[in-house]
Image: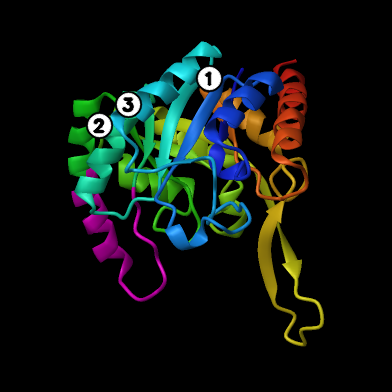
Amino acid sequence: MKLSVFTVATPDLTPNELILIAKEAGLQGIEWRYKDTPAEVLQEKPSFWRNNRCTISPDTSEEALDQLRTSVKDKNLTTIALTPYLTCGDIPATELAMKHAHRLGASLVRVGVPWYNRNENYNHMFAQAITYLEVVEDLAKKYNVKALVETHHMTIAASASLAHRLVQRFNPNYVGVLFDPGNMVYEGFENYRMGLELLGEHLAHVHIKNAGWFQSEGDRDKLWSARAMPMDQGMVDWKQVLHDLKSVGYTGWYGVEDFSGLHSSKEMLVFYTKWFKALLEEVEG
C-alpha cells in the first residue's frame, strides 16, 4: 500500500509544511506540482490552479532542489513524481522538468498531450504527439525517469484506450500511463477493468479523486455539467476500481488529488489515508 499526494490539492501549504503534514497523515510519497506562478497572482488567496503555494517553479535553483530532496528524505518520504503542465512538442521544457525530477529523486514525470477542442483534426494531433513522445522516450532514458500520459478530459487521451493508442509503441520502462478515473467522469469513461487490461505494462500510476454530473438549476434547456466531488462520493466506484486494479496485478502508487474543497488540506490528507486504507483492506480481503 503506497499512498501519495499531488500537491495541486494542497494549495495553502508550503512544501515544508506539506512534508510534515503528509508524514503525520501516514502517506509515503509526494508528487510535486511544477509550474511558474505569475507575480500578479501571488497576493491572491491560495487556490488549486493559480496561487498554489505547494508548487515548484522551473526557475528553482539546484541548491533549493537538493534541500527539498533532503527534507523529504529526512521524513522517510519519497518524491515519486514531478507533475508539470507541459505543452506537447515543447522539448526544452520537457527536458528541464525531467532534469529537475532526476535531481529530486522522482521516477515519474507527466508529459504534454494535445488538447482537443474540435479546431484541429485528431489524426494530425495524434501524429504530432507521437513525434513528441519519440523524443520524450529518449529523454526519459537519459534522466532515468518514466514519462506519463494522463487520462484527461478534453485531450486526445481522454480514455484508457486512447492513452494506450499513444503509448503502445513505446517501451513501458520509459513511457507509461497515469490512470485517472476521476477525469474519466468528465469524458472518456470505459469499463475500468477492460481499460486496465488494455494498458498492461504501460499502467504506471493512479490518481484518486471523484466527480459527478449535475443539472443546471433554473435552466430551461436542462444542461448538465460535471464538477469535482469528495473522493468517497461521486460517480467513480473506487471499490470496483480497486478490484479491477487488483485483477491486473497493480502494485504501484495511489496519489490523492481531491478538488472538492470539503476539507482543509490537513484534514483531507488524514481522511484520505484512513478512508483509502480501509477500502484497500476490504478489497484485499
Q: Which residue type does callout 3 highlight?
A: Glu
Q: The residue tagged with tag 1: helix, strand or loop?
A: loop
Q: Which residue type does callout 1 highlight?
A: Thr
Q: Nearest the camera: 5 or 241?
A: 5
Q: Nearest the camera: 272 or 213?
A: 272
Q: Is residue 123 magenta?
A: yes
Tag 3 or tag 2, which sits nearer the N-term?
3
Task: Say which quarter of the image contains residue 63.
Answer: top left
Q: Position of residue 190 (x, y in %)?
A: 56, 49
Task: Say which quarter of the image contains residue 180.
Answer: top right
Q: Position of residue 241 (x, y in %)?
A: 64, 35
Q: Which residue type does callout 2 highlight?
A: Ala
Is the residue under label 2 in contact with that under label 1 (CB below 8 Å)? no
The residue sitting at 54% across, 23% down in the picture is 29
Where, quadrant-wise, is the C terminus in this rendering? top right
Q: Which stretch is magenta?
A: 112-133
Label 1 neighbour load within 10 Å: few <14, some 14-19, many 20+: few
Q: Which residue is mark 3?
A: 63
Q: Which residue is mark 1?
A: 251
Q: In this view of the protein, can residue 149 be seen by the observer? A: yes
Q: The residue tagged with tag 3: helix, strand or loop?
A: helix
Marks 1, 2: nearer the viewer: 2
Q: Nearest the camera: 95 or 75?
A: 75
